[in-house]
Amino acid sequence: MAYREYPVPKALRRHVQCVWRLQAPPHGPQNIFADGRCEVILHFGEPPSAWSAEHGWQRQAPLLFAAQHRGAIRLASEHRLDCVGIRLRPSASAAIAASRLAELRDRIVDLSTLTAEFATALGAGAVRFTVDPADPEFWALLEAQLSSHPIDGRIEAAVATLESKAGQISVAATAAAAAMSIRALQTRFLECVGLSVKEFARILRLQALIRSLDERSEPLSQLAAEAGFSDQPHATRELRRLTGSTPALLRQSLQQNRDGEDALRLAAAFIRGYD
């Protein structure tokens, strides 16, 4: 498997965190964990199937918009994966879905249903990116589509505050840092990010715990406390909801994954930012 993240030009940095490329062999069911980011994803080969409680396993479209998720995304592929993803900044989440962002929460949709013109252009642009990641036409395409979407500086500040505290800050303190009332922050944050403030903070705390489980060997109770959970059972409940696994099993799987092909191979690559 090969996974790599590419930095973006200065003009796009308020909108895009990175562009990534993933090439992977066929795989059975794997969970991808929510990270508080929306993504645009283009598959060059046969797309994987995604699981939902409502529809079961369904083949994904070649060009996708993955909205904010509060739980794990479950994927399986019978064919080799080859895809490019555009990971948006949290405060730029509405640059693609606009006013539909909040209603798309926990969903992955065909990009053409949101913006057909951009989807068509991106298909050709992403091919150029795979040949040359510095291709100016690809980056100009992204800039034309995304930079026209205004970023609310107050929400950008709120996101930065939440991220700097790894989600361990109250809604009231976040609102104060963004110079907004609590009610205004809650309303505008959902519109711009696609999650409530509390949901986003919860994901940040869980992501911090997952990274600690991947990188460190201290007791689970210590890592849970550092990540802002009241106790280990609280962390276990929240982590099971996000990942489908307990902290002990997740740590074991992540550590084993460093040398093998297991059910967390894709998740581990996204967590670490590399294969």
Image: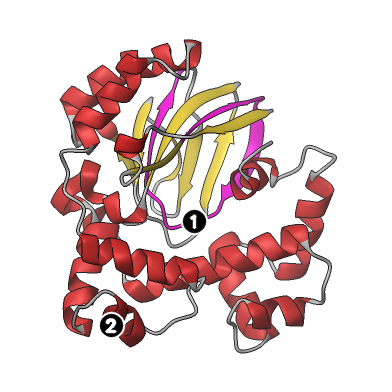
Q: Secondary structure at mark 1?
A: loop
**What numbered label is drawn on residue 34?**
1
**What span is colored magenta in the figure?**
19-44
Q: Nearer the viewer, residue 72 or 3?
A: 3
At 39% from the left edge and 85% from the top edge, which residue is drawn?
170
What's under tag 2, amino acid-wise? Ala
Q: Earlier in the sequence, mark 1 or mark 2?
A: 1
**Residue matched to label 2:** 176
The amino acid sitting under disc 1 is Ala
The quadrant where residue 216 appears:
bottom right
Q: Quadrant of the N terminus?
A: top right
Front disc: 1 or 2: 2
Q: Is residue 208 left or right of residue 115?
A: right
Q: Is residue 190 visible?
A: no
Q: Quadrant of the C terminus?
A: top right
Judged left or right of residue 58, residue 267 is right
Secondary-structure class at tag 2: helix
Residue 131 image point, x, y percent: 49, 10
Rendered position, 124 above or below 184 = above
Asked whether 234 falls inside the magenta stretch, the response is: no
Instruction: Tell which of 95 and 159 is nearer to you.
Output: 159
